[in-house]
Image (cartoon, helix red, strand yellow):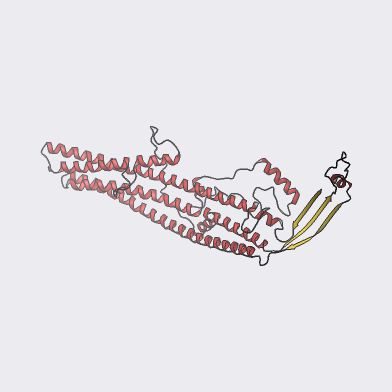
Amino acid sequence: TLFETEFRHPLLKGGGIEFNRIAGPNGSPGNYNGIMIARTRTDIALADFEAAVRDFLEDVEQTYWRLYFAYRDLDARIAARDSALEAWRRAKVQLNEEVGDPLDEPLTRAQFYQFQAQVAEALSGVGTDSALARSTGVYATERQLRVLMGIEVNDDRLIRPADEPSRAELVFDWSESLNQAMQRRVELRRQKWTVRQRELELIAARNLLRMQLDLVGGYRWRGFGDELLGRRSSGIESSAFADLFTGDLQGWQLGLQLSTPIGNRIGHVAERNAELQLIRERAVLEEQERYVAKELSDGFADLDRAFKLAQINFNRAISSRQRLEGEKLKYDIGTNLLQFVLDAESQLADAESQFFRSLVDYNLAAAKIHFAKGTYLDYLGISLSEGPWVANAYRSAAKEADRYGPRVFNYCISKPGRLSQGPYPQLILPREE
C-alpha cells in the first residue's frame, strides 16, 4: 500500500498573484477567466446596460416631444378650420341674400373641407407610406408613447404633455463639452474597458511564454505485505497495512523541475494574438473618439440651426397673423377678394405649425448635445448605481485582505485596484449659458 502527497509551486510560467488573478487557476494560452477578467467583463456589461437605458430614454423623450408637436399642429389646424367654417357661413348667407360674389360660397366650402381633412390627419395620423405625412398624428403618437412607458394602449384616457419646450438660447462651451464627451461617453468608457481586458490578456500570454520552473516537494508512506490486511486463520500474518503503520518506509523529496516545449509555438501564437487584439481595440477606440467629436460638432451646428429657424418661424407666424388681420379688414370694407383671406388663413396655420415644429427640434437638438457629451442621463435627472454584493462576499473579501495585506491587494473594496472605481459621478450638470 502507498500513500503519497505532493505540492508544486510555479516560479516562472503560471506563477504570481497577478497571473492567477488574470488567467485563473487553470489558465491556458487564449483561455483567461480570472477574477480581474471577470470584473472587466462585468464593467463592460454595465456599460452596455447604461447605453441601453440611455437609448430607451431618448426614444421616450423624442416621442414625448413629437406628441407635443402633434397637439400643437392639431390646434393650428382646428383654428384654421373654424375660421374657414365661419367664412363659409358668411358666404352662404351672402349667397342666399344675393349679395357678393357667388363663387365665394364654393371657395370657402372647399377651404373648409381642406382644413377638415388636415384636422383628421393631425388627430388620427396618416399612413407611414404616405408622402403627405407631416406627423404621425395625436392618437398614433400617444399610443407609441404608451408602449414605451409600459402602460395600456387604451384605457379611456388621453395623454397630453404638460411641459413646454424651452425657448431660451443655450450656449455650450466647445472645449468643456469635448472633454466631457471623451470622459463620459458610455461607448468610449466601454471600449476603454475592452482595451484594459486585452492588456490583461497580453500580460497573461507573456507569462505563458516563460519556461516551466516549479518548486516540487513530495512525501511517501509505504507498506509491504503478502496480504492487504493479513489472515491469521491461514497462518499468513504479513499485512501491508501493518507494515505501513510501523513508519519504517517513509520517504520525501524536494527540488526544482524545469521543462519547456521546443519552440513554444502555442505560447508565441497566443502572445501574437493578444498583441493584435490589443492593437485592434486601441484603433477602434481612436475611431470612436473621432466619431464622438464629429457627432458633438454636428450637435452644435444643429442647435444653432434649430434656434435660428425657431426665431425665423416665430417672426413668420407673427407676420402671417398680421397679414390675416389686414386681409380680413380689407375684405370687410370691400376692397379685397375672399381668396386673399383664405390664403392668409392657410398660411397662418402652416406658419404656426412650423414654429412649434422648429421649437421641438430646438429642444431635441439640445438633448442631442447632452447625448453626444455623455451627460444625457444627468440632463434627465436619472442616476444609475451598482447594487451591493452578498454578505458572504464581504466576509470573504475581509479574510483575503487580512491574509495578503493592503500592500499587495485590498480585497475589501468592491472595485479592486486597477479595475472599476465605481460609477462615474452623475447628476453633475454641465455649465449652460
How many marks on residues?
0
Residue 360 to residue 300: above or below: above
| Residue 308 x/y as whole percent | 37, 55
The front one of 384 and 36 is 36
The front one of 388 and 273 is 273
| Residue 183 x/y as whole percent | 55, 56
Residue 352 to residue 155: above or below: below
Residue ID at (72%, 46%)? 398
Residue 175 to residue 79: above or below: below
The front one of 220 and 381 is 220
Kindly give the residue lying farthest to the bottom in the view shown.
263
In the image, taking residue 430 as reference, residue 311 lies left or right, namely left
| Residue 20 x/y as whole percent | 68, 55
Residue ID at (75%, 48%)? 402
Kindly give the residue lying farthest to the top in the view shown.
156
User: Quarter of the image holding residue 196?
Assistant: bottom right
Q: Is residue 63 visible?
A: yes
In the image, taking residue 254 as reference, residue 391 lies left or right, namely left
